[in-house]
Image: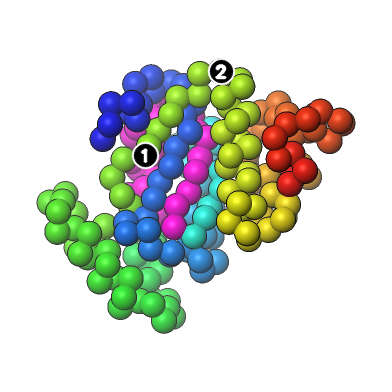
Amino acid sequence: MKEGYTIKDQTKAHFITATVVDWIDIFSRQIYRDCLINSLSYCIKNKGMILYGYVIMTNHIHLIVQSEQGELSNLLRDFKKFTATGILDLLQNSPESRKEWILERLHKATYSHSRNKNYQVWQFGNHSEEIYTEKFLWSKLDYIHLNPVRAGIVTRASDFVYSSASNYVNGNGVLKEITLADNPVADVLKGWTIVKSEHY
């Protein structure tokens, strides 16, 4: 992992990107997105996760996350391990037309890493960036929330179910336990101007 993307201060909030191996579009199906939502909710309630923002795309997720215990690396490791187990269980035991193809790709991903014996769901590393200023926090929240807009999935970020944009704009979302920052999106609605704010 590049030195610039390691988590040096375990107590600080970080912008995180977790990507499926080979960029497989596992999360194009709701059942796997819901697995992530349930896991995030569990970590917030039971593992000391503080989640300021998130988005679930088809093959990766972005989080702005912090650990109450100051053990962010351990928290992310446990989250990825737990979700990998859940995703594999769903792949193997639920109707899935892509099952054999996906499992083969996940198995081949283990060839270059002895750490995983059978399947690997997530790429190693979290491409973490420390949130060092409020301005950087807002820019990363904006980036996260506009991902589905840039991908052409929705025209307004708050219409995308699997992100925290709706939590910030409408006060609700599929994941209820978001720790709302003083997001400039709220001020945008009162007349402030930020880049691409019209897409909220």
| 157 shown above or below 185 | below
Q: Amino acid at mark 1?
A: Asn
Q: Position of residue 81 (x, y in %)?
A: 33, 49
The question of residue 74 being in magenta is answered with: yes
Task: Place residue 79 in its image quadrant.
Answer: top left
For the residues labelled 1 and 2, the Cα–Cα distance comes to 20 Å
Residue, disc 2? 133
Helix, strand or loop at label 2? It is loop
Q: Position of residue 41 (x, y in %)?
A: 54, 46
Residue, disc 1? 126
| 179 shown above or below 149 | above
Cβ atoms at labels 1 and 2 below 8 Å apart = no
Foreground of the two, 100 or 5: 5
For marks 1 and 2, the one nearer the N-term is 1
Residue sitting at 52 percent across and 55 percent down? Answer: 57
Disc 1: CA contacts within 10 A as few (<14), some (14-19) or many (>=20): many
Helix, strand or loop at label 1? It is loop
The reply to whether residue 124 is visible in this rendering is: yes
- Quarter of the image containing the N terminus? top left
Q: Amino acid at mark 2?
A: Thr
Foreground of the two, 84 or 147: 147
- Quarter of the image containing the C terminus? top right
Q: Position of residue 74 (x, y in %)?
A: 33, 34
Disc 2: CA contacts within 10 A as few (<14), some (14-19) or many (>=20): few
The segment highlighted magenta reads: 59-84
Q: Is residue 71 left or right of residue 163?
A: left
The reply to whether residue 42 is visible in this rendering is: no
Residue sitting at 39 percent across and 50 percent down? Answer: 19
Task: Place residue 72 in its image quadrant.
Answer: top left
